[in-house]
Image (tube, grey):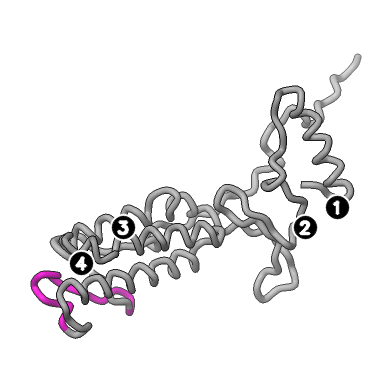
Amino acid sequence: MVNGTRAHAEALREEAAAVLAPMGLRLAEEKTRVVHIDEGFDFLSFTIRRMRKRGTSKQYVYTFPSRKAIQAIKDKISAKTYRSTRNLDPDGLIQGINRTLAGSPGANYHRHGVSKAVFSAIDHHAWGRIMRWLRQKYKQGNSRLGMPALRRRFCVRGTWQFAANGVRFTGASAVPVTRYRYRGSSIPTPWAPQPVPATS
């Protein structure tokens, strides 16, 4: 990151390329872009972008799951609820989806970003896929999903949940979001100014 103009950033990019060249390395053109922090950029499945905090005039740099990462998780849930998986028992399906949502690069990986609303959206997608999977498997409407084969469907905080044989759909929202605290000024680096020794 550069506290300056685009020209400063591009000059630094060329400088970095010159350092890498003797080691036989090069910057990939398709993965190396110069962007403004207000435009944002994707890095390691996160989008990093400066935005105005809701209800204020102050701006902060936010880190949240990238659209590509969110779509990848949704695609995995869709794959687990294809018609080819209807031979599974409901508890096996729910357990597999829980593991996918909580695993990496799922909620556990993204829990340190601004992810609460994203987790809820992913859970909504998963809930709908499970509902359709059950309706197709048992050829029933919503009103009969409490049949013995599913064991039960119950309400938690106003949201209907699925459970079968002791396995409950928990979703990504079950993973608590724990934001990182800023520690940039306290992390030692080789470039930190060294104290001048006292002379007598």
Q: Which range of residues does the magenta coloring cover?
A: 144-158
Q: Is residue 48 left or right of residue 129?
A: right
Cβ–Cβ under 8 Å for marks 3 and 1: no
Residue holding disc 4: 163
Cβ–Cβ under 8 Å for marks 2 and 3: no
Q: Is residue 198 left or right of residue 31?
A: right
Residue holding disc 3: 98
Q: Earlier in the sequence, mark 3 or mark 1?
A: 1
Q: CA distance from mark 1 to mark 4?
A: 54 Å
Q: CA distance from mark 4 to mark 2?
A: 46 Å
| Badge 1 amino acid | Arg
Q: Earlier in the sequence, mark 1 or mark 4?
A: 1
The reply to whether the magenta stretch includes residue 154 is yes
Residue 29 picture quarter: top right
* Residue 36 image label: 2
Q: CA distance from mark 2 to mark 3?
A: 37 Å
Residue 14, placed above or below residue 93 = above
| Badge 3 amino acid | Asn
Q: Earlier in the sequence, mark 4 or mark 2?
A: 2
| Badge 2 amino acid | His
Neighbours of disc 4 within 10 Å: few (<14), some (14-19), many (20+): some
Number of disc labels? 4
Residue holding disc 1: 6
Q: Earlier in the sequence, mark 2 or mark 3?
A: 2
Q: Identify the residue at image location x=83%, y=46%.
A: 9
Q: Residue furthest right?
A: 200
Q: Earlier in the sequence, mark 2 or mark 1?
A: 1
